Image (cartoon, rainbow, N blue to C red):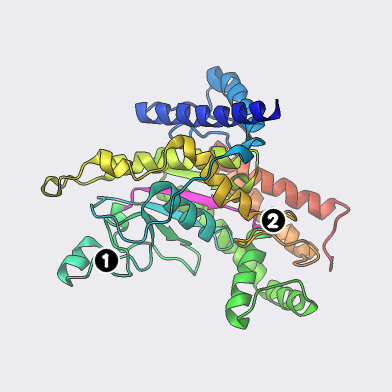
C-alpha cells in the first residue's frame, strides 16, 4: 500500500508540473496563491491573484504539497551541468540577481544549469557580441559572452555586483531574496572563509570575529539590502511580467521548493522562446534550444537531488546555509534597524503583492525575535 501511495504521490507532482508547463506554453497567466506564492502565475511571472481561480489553485497546491513527501520515489535523473557554451546564439539573456549570502551558487547557477542545459554567466565579466567580434574572442573561452548564457548572475547594486556590458539585451530578471538576518551572516561566512582560508564555524574565535564585523558593517549591509530590493523593482517598473521574485526560504522548503523550481523553469523557458536568434545557416531551431531544458515532470526530482538533499538534518545547507543565533548573534539595535528597513520597503512596494508577502514574512520573524523568548546571545 505504501508503495502504491508513493507512486501516486510522484504522479501527482509530475501531473501538476505538466499542467503548469502546458499553461505556460499556451501563454496563459493563471494566478498562484499564498505565502510567497501570492501573485505568481503559471508562466512563472509575478502578477495579481484572481479570486475565481484561487480556490481551484489552493486545491491543486494542497495536492502538490501532500505529494512532496513522496519524492523519495523519484528515479535518478541523469543530467550533468553543461561544460561548454551553447552552439547557437540567444539574442538576449536573463539576470539572476541575488543579495550576497542568498544561495547564488545553489539557485542562480547550479540549479539553473541543470534545468536548462545551458551555462550561467557572470554579469561583470560577460563580453558583448560586439566586443567579441572586434577582439575576435574565442567563443569557447572562460568568459561566457552574449548569446552563450541563459542567465547572468549578479549581486548589483551591492558593491560585489555589476550590471552586464550588454545590459540593454537583458530584458528579464529573476530575483532571489533571503531574510537579511540569514543572508548577512552567510555573507560574513563567505568573507571569513576567503580571508582565513578555512570554513567559518562556531568557535569562540569565529563568533568574536562575527560580532566585531557585525558592529561595524551590519547597518551598511542592511542599507545595501534595501537598495537591492528597490533597484530590481525600479529597473522593470511597469513590466512585472519581465521580473519575478523568489525567496530562498521557499526554494529550500520541502513543501514549496519543488513548485518554485517548476515556476523558475517556466519563466526561463519563456525567456528562451523570446530570445532565440534565427540562424538558418547552422540549421538550428528554437525547438532544439528548448530540448536542452529538462522535461517538466523531471523538475521536482531535480530539485530534490540538488536542493533538498543539500539541506542537512539540522537545517544548515551544504551550499552555505543558516546559522543559529548562538553562532551568529544579533544585538537589539540590529533587530530594530532590520525591522525599520523592512517596514520602509513594505510601505514603498505595497502594491506588489508577492514582494510584500516575502518581506512581511521576514518582518514577522524579526519582530518575534526581538520580542520573543529566544533572544540573541549578546542582547
Residue 172 is inside the magenta segment: yes
Q: Residues within 10 Å of mark 1 (few under 14, many from 20)?
A: few
In the rendered view, tell whether residue 172 sits above or below residue 38.
below
* Residue contact at pointers 2 and 1, CB within 8 angstroms: no
Secondary structure beneath dot 1 equals: loop
**Residue beneath disc 2:** 312
Q: Quadrant of residue 295?
A: top left
Q: Which mark is residue 292?
A: none
Q: Which residues are magenta?
A: 170-181
Left or right: where 298 falls relative to 362: left
Report whether residue 149 is seen: yes
In the rendered view, tell whether residue 339 sits above or below residue 297.
below
Q: Quadrant of residue 185?
A: bottom right
Toward the top, the furthest residue is: 52
In the rendered view, tell whether residue 135 sits above or below residue 90.
below
Toward the right, the furthest residue is: 373
Q: Residue 124, position in %: x, y? A: 38, 67
Q: Which mark is residue 140?
A: 1
User: What residue appears at the point 58 percent right and 24 percent down from the top-left corner?
Assistant: 60
Q: Quadrant of residue 132?
A: bottom left
Q: Nearest the camera: 144 or 118?
A: 118
Secondary structure beneath dot 2 equals: loop
Amino acid at each position: 500500500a505504501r508503495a502504491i501511495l508513493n507512486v501516486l504521490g510522484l504522479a501527482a507532482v509530475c501531473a501538476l508540473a505538466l499542467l503548469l508547463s502546458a499553461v505556460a506554453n499556451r501563454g496563459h497567466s493563471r494566478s498562484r496563491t499564498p505565502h510567497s506564492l501570492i501573485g505568481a502565475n503559471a508562466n512563472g511571472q509575478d502578477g495579481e491573484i484572481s479570486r475565481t481561480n484561487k480556490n481551484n489553485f489552493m486545491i491543486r497546491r494542497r495536492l502538490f504539497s501532500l505529494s512532496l513527501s513522496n519524492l523519495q520515489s523519484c528515479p535518478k535523473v541523469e543530467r550533468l551541468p553543461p561544460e561548454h557554451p551553447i552552439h547557437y546564439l540567444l539574442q538576449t539573456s536573463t539576470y539572476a540577481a541575488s543579495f550576497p549570502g542568498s544561495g547564488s551558487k545553489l539557485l542562480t547557477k547550479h540549479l539553473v544549469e541543470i534545468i536548462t542545459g545551458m551555462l550561467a554567466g557572470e554579469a561583470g565579466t560577460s563580453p558583448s557580441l560586439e566586443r567579441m567580434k572586434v577582439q575576435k574572442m574565442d567563443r569557447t573561452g572562460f568568459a561566457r559572452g552574449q548569446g552563450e548564457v541563459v542567465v547572468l548572475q549578479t549581486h548589483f547594486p551591492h558593491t560585489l555586483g555589476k550590471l552586464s556590458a550588454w545590459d540593454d539585451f537583458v530584458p528579464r530578471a529573476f530575483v532571489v531574496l533571503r531574510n537579511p538576518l540569514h543572508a548577512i551572516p552567510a555573507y560574513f561566512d563567505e568573507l571569513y572563509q576567503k580571508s582565513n582560508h578555512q570554513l567559518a564555524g562556531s568557535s569562540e574565535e569565529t563568533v568574536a570575529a562575527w560580532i566585531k564585523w557585525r558592529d561595524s558593517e551590519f547597518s551598511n549591509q542592511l542599507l545595501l539590502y534595501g537598495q537591492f530590493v528597490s533597484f530590481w523593482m525600479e529597473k522593470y517598473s511597469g513590466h512585472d511580467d519581465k521580473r519575478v521574485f523568489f525567496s530562498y526560504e521557499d526554494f529550500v522548503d520541502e513543501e514549496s521548493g519543488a513548485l518554485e523550481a517548476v515556476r523558475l523553469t517556466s519563466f526561463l523557458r519563456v525567456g528562451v522562446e523570446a530570445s532565440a536568434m534565427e540562424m538558418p545557416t547552422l540549421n538550428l531551431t528554437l525547438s532544439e534550444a528548448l530540448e536542452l531544458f529538462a522535461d517538466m515532470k523531471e523538475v521536482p526530482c531535480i530539485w530534490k537531488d540538488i536542493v533538498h538533499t543539500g539541506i542537512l538534518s539540522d537545517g544548515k545547507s551544504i551550499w552555505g546555509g543558516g546559522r543559529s543565533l548562538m553562532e551568529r548573534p544579533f544585538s537589539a539595535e540590529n533587530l530594530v534597524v532590520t525591522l525599520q528597513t523592512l517596514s520602509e520597503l513594505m510601505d514603498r512596494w505595497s502594491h506588489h503583492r508577492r514582494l510584500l508577502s516575502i518581506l512581511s514574512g521576514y518582518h514577522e520573524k524579526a519582530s518575534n525575535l526581538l520580542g520573543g523568548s529566544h533572544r540573541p546571545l549578546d542582547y
